[in-house]
Amino acid sequence: MSYIIYGIVALLIFSAIIHLFINKIDLSSLVICAMVIVFSYSGIVAIDYKQQTNDYEIWSGKITKVRHKEEWDEWHPPRIETYTETDSKGNAVTKTREIPGYWEHHEAKNYITTSDEGEFRVYETLDGKRFNDSFVNSNAELEEYYPVGMATASVHNYENRLKASYSIFKHKDIDLSDYKDMPEYPIEQDKLTVNRLIGEFKDKDKLSRYLDSINSNLNDTNNKNNKENTKSYKQVNLMFVNFEDKDESYGYALQDYWENGAKNDFIVTFGTDKNNKATWCYVFSWTDVEILKTDVREYIMNLDNLDNFTEVMDHVSELIEKKFDRKEFKDFDYIQIETTTTSKIIMVIILLGCCVFVSEGRRYI
């Protein structure tokens, strides 16, 4: 709002100067420019804010229901349509015509419902076989390809004020230009999952599906810890990144490159040697429970090797279940988002254009 006020005040001052010392201002051109400033500045500020604060997080869930709708044919009966046309003398003539009846085919449709994304249509099996009118033909058959209870993951947008201010958290001794091979944050959803196992892992596809199930259990609102009979719903996204043959600075660099991850992330980075033993481990997350990060690091560093990574993921998830507490991002609502220099320049250009239009208004109106 302040930029709109500044823009209109500047326009009025300029118009007053032109009116007093050069020539009279056409009021309609002034009104037009004021409206241009109000609407354009509002749009620029809104888009700028959205670009600075829009972020992604990964949700975990499970398939809760499948629904198959059989193909069917709909009969549209004949009908009389009234229409108007103009004759050779220019007179409107009302006529009628018969629209013959016809059959319309509606293809079979298949839907699944997940706890993280709701209901949506699926067009093929997970291995790429397309559904059609003869494949599949029932809920039971659809469930063979999308079993209820299967772990899922999806990417969602959220407002992250910290994204515009992360520079205050960066490691002072890390220059990201020295780390050209940083992996991108995984926001591509494929076959109901998101890649949360980054780097070299033996049997990676199998391990990724297992990590999906771990995340789904950690995020299941109905899940209960068998030992303590307490809810284990954590709103967490567990990820592992293996920087094989890299030093620990890559963990710090990834933290800066990913800007400490999303609000629900718990990211375990590590390096390994030729024997698959961890040479370093660095954990980052927005959670305030620092002892959890320390426990995970010590556990991984004390292992002889990481060959049995299923066991590693199980143990880390147990530690998360006991100690993780997601950071509430409303704690950062105090952060003020400054409009970027680029947007300010665009607003100045618009203001200058409006000033020219006002000074030359009578030529255009």
Image (cartoon, rainbow, N blue to C red):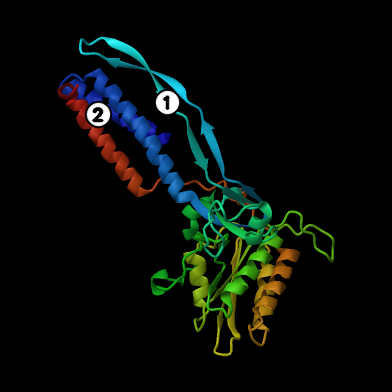
Distance from the alpha carbon under mark 2 to that under mark 1: 65 Å
User: Horizontal and vertical percent for residue 46?
Assistant: 43, 40
Q: From where the camera sits, is residue 6 visible?
A: no
Q: Is residue 348 left or right of residue 59?
A: left
Q: Is residue 263 left or right of residue 50?
A: right
Where 77 falls versus 327 (above or below)?
A: above
The amino acid type, in three-letter code, at marker 2 is Phe
Where 51 falls versus 16 (above or below)?
A: below
User: Horizontal and vertical percent for residue 270?
Assistant: 57, 77
SS label for mark 1: strand
User: Horizontal and vertical percent for residue 254?
Assistant: 50, 69
Name the residue at 45% across, 50% down. Answer: 52
Nearest to the observer: residue 74 or residue 115: 74
Q: Which residue is at the far bottom?
A: 275
Name the residue at 50% across, 84% down. Answer: 245
Question: How would you rate the neighbour count of disc 1 (Cα within 10 Å): few for under 14, some for 14-19, many for 20 or more?
Answer: few
Provide the residue designation for mark 2.
Answer: 14
User: Horizontal and vertical percent for residue 236?
Assistant: 65, 60
Provide the residue designation for mark 1.
Answer: 99
Q: Are marks 2 and 1 in contact (CB under 8 Å)?
A: no
Report the disc number at residue 75. none
Quadrant assignment, res 242: bottom right
The amino acid type, in three-letter code, at marker 1 is Ile
